[in-house]
Image (tube, rainbow, N blue to C red):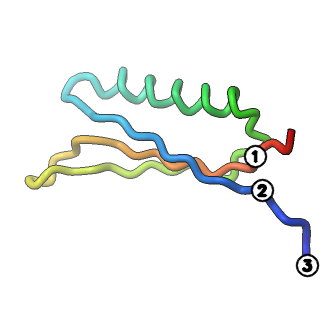
Amino acid sequence: MGEKKNWKVKTFSTELKIFQTVKELGTLDDQVNRFIIENKVKKVISASDTTTTDNTGATIGLIRVLTYEASTE
């Protein structure tokens, strides 16, 4: 078979508050970017976002999933 890949998945989340979404998304981006740098991520395979909701259907949070190829160092 082909070369074995060292793929991993990391999940990040943030609470979303009304009128603060831009700030919270920026903070989430910073958290993910810091993780990529600190963990010497070799390659990002995918990144996806999904929302969480309360019992009324209102968006209250965001989950970001990062699939990446880990450094072999």
Position of the C terminus, as image quadrant, is top right
Tell me the quarter of the picture where residue 32 sits: top right
Q: Which label is found at residue 6?
A: 2
Residue found 91% across the figure and 72% down from its top: 2
Disc 1 residue crowd, few under 14, some 14–19, many 20+, Cα 10 Å: some
> Is the residue 42 above or below the residue 26 in the image?
below
Left of 42 or right of it: where is 22?
left
Residue found 75% across the figure and 50% down from its top: 69
Residue 21: image location, x then y, percent? 30, 28
Q: Which label is found at residue 1?
A: 3
Report the amino acid beneath label 1. Answer: Ala
Q: Earlier in the sequence, mark 1 or mark 2?
A: 2
Disc 1 from disc 3: Cα separation: 20 Å
Position of the N terminus, as image quadrant, is bottom right
Left of 45 or right of it: where is 54?
left
Residue found 76% across the figure and 33% down from its top: 40
Report the amino acid beneath label 2. Answer: Asn
Q: Earlier in the sequence, mark 3 or mark 2?
A: 3
Q: Return the residue found at the far front.
A: 73
Residue 6: image location, x then y, percent? 77, 56
Identify the residue under disc 1.
Answer: 70
